[in-house]
């Protein structure tokens, strides 16, 4: 049984604790912490885990072999660095850290340690539909890829959500996904600003992002975070000899009264339920066998942060912004996997 400590027991922290304790094999949650002590006590009490005052105490706990960081983005760096210093594997929810500088500090700490300890929570790589899409692409079914059209729609977002978050918090999933899908880096970013939806109040929503892949593939991403009707994730790759796209929203369609109805997922928890299960089960297996994590690395977290920053700059200036990464350390030499 891999003993895991969870830092941050909010929405996704609780959802991951549920899957670690009731869905997955070979893992147990032995400790938790949250700056909201009442929430930590309630969640920890429910599963019989030790409740610590800080994330650092969770990492230092001898009854914790690996850490899961599910706190707010700006707090990730301190916990990931503490886990590396303690030589314990750490799964960190996206984004790896709030700035590219912070991500680079994590990369440098891991490189100094000498082998991989960090995995970042970009779960789309574990989603059945995205994996099938990649198989179709890699199998040559649609020929050389030319373009990809994506939509990332949330029913609503919390009141603290700022327009930049459509890039740093939302489209960051597409940033990671297309690097993985096409096996190449994003070279430049543009952001177009459409007419504003009245559902978002003062928030500039939607946005229209354009990523130029180093291979020449062009990707467009619509982010709409007040779409109301549900959580809708779309992707279609246009190749030289055909197209391949993510399938319908739901495995069940109801035909009635002359209409067909496909339920739309309410949020990311529902749409990516199975992807999170696979993501964490594969992580638990890799760590339990004494190996390195195989999912998105600290380098992937860094690359996503650099593209995010380019996107924010493109949004503010209206310009096409080039993406420039530092040289990739040998530890991550396989490139974009
Ligand atoms: P949330 O606000 O529901 O929960 C975050 C929790 O972290 C809160 O309980 C908060 O009190 C706690 N916290 C904040 N600072 C802390 C600190 N310094 N130490 C310990 N605990 C601290 O937010 P959420 O929606 O659960 O998001 C958490 C993280 O997960 C974010 O990085 C977010 O981007 C990521 N996330 C990923 C996905 C995904 O699809 N992979 C989905 C949602 C959220
Ligand atoms: C949230 O943090 C996530 O990561 C979800 O997957 C994404 O759809 C949402 O826009 C983010 O706020």
Image (cartoon, rainbow, N blue to C red):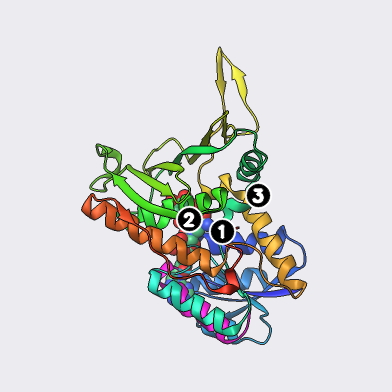
Q: Find residue 310 and report its image quarter.
A: bottom left
Q: CA distance from mark 2 to mark 1?
A: 8 Å
Residue range (magenta): 72-88
Instruction: Nearest to the eye among marks 3 and 2: give it.
Output: 2
Sequence-wise first label, 2 or 1: 2
Name the spot of residue 292 as percent of width and height, x first: 68, 72
Name the spot of residue 14 as percent of width and height, x first: 57, 62
Q: Find residue 169 and report its image quarter.
A: bottom left
Crowd class of label 2 (few under 14; some 14 to 19; many from 20; radius 10 Å)? many
Q: CA distance from mark 1 to mark 3?
A: 23 Å
Name the spot of residue 166 as percent of width and height, x first: 36, 51
Q: How many marks?
A: 3
Q: Marks 2 and 1: CB-CB under 8 Å?
A: yes
**Compared with residue 254, is residue 22 higher up or lower down, i.e. above or below?**
below
Is 113 positioned to the left or the right of 228 in the image? right
For image coordinates 61% across by 58% down, the residue present is 337
Q: Which residue is mark 1?
A: 336
For image coordinates 74% across by 66% down, the residue present is 285
Q: Is residue 122 visible?
A: yes
Q: Which residue is mark 2?
A: 185
Q: Which residue is mark 3?
A: 274
Is 232 positioned to the left or the right of 1 in the image? left
Sequence-wise first label, 1 or 3: 3
**Compared with residue 104, is residue 265 higher up or lower down, i.e. above or below?**
above
The prevailing secondary structure element of the residues shown in magenta is helix
């Amino acid at each position: 049984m891999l003993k895991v400590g969870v830092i941050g027991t909010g929405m996704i922290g609780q959802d991951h604790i549920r899957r670690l304790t009731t869905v997955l094999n070979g893992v147990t949650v032995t400790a938790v912490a949250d700056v909201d002590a009442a929430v930590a006590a309630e969640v920890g009490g429910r599963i019989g885990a030790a409740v610590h005052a800080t994330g650092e105490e969770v990492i230092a706990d001898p009854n914790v072999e690996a850490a899961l960081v599910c706190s707010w983005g700006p707090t990730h760096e301190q916990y990931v660095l503490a886990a590396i210093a303690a030589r314990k594997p750490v799964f960190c929810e996206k984004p790896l850290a709030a700035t590219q500088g912070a991500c680079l500090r994590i990369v440098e700490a891991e490189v100094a340690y000498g082998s991989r300890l960090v995995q970042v929570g970009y779960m789309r790589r574990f989603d059945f539909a995205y994996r099938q899409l990649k198989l179709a692409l890699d199998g040559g079914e649609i020929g050389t890829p030319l373009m990809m059209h994506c939509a990332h729609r949330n029913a609503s977002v919390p009141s603290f959500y700022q327009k930049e978050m459509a890039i740093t918090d939302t489209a960051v999933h597409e940033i990671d996904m297309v690097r993985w899908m096409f096996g190449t880096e994003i070279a430049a970013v543009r952001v177009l600003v459409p007419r504003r939806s009245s559902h978002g109040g003062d928030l500039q929503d939607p946005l229209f992002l354009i990523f130029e892949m180093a291979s020449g593939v062009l990707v467009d991403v619509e982010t709409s975070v007040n779409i109301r009707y549900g959580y809708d994730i779309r992707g279609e790759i246009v190749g030289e000899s055909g197209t391949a796209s993510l399938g319908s929203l739901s495995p069940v369609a109801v035909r009635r009264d002359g209409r067909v109805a496909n339920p739309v997922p309410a949020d990311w928890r529902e749409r990516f339920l199975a992807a999170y299960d696979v993501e964490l089960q594969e992580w638990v297996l890799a760590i339990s066998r004494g190996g390195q994590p195989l999912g998105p690395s600290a380098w992937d977290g860094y690359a996503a942060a650099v593209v995010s920053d380019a996107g924010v700059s493109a949004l503010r200036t209206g310009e096409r912004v080039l993406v420039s990464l530092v040289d990739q350390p040998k530890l991550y030499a396989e490139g974009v996997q």
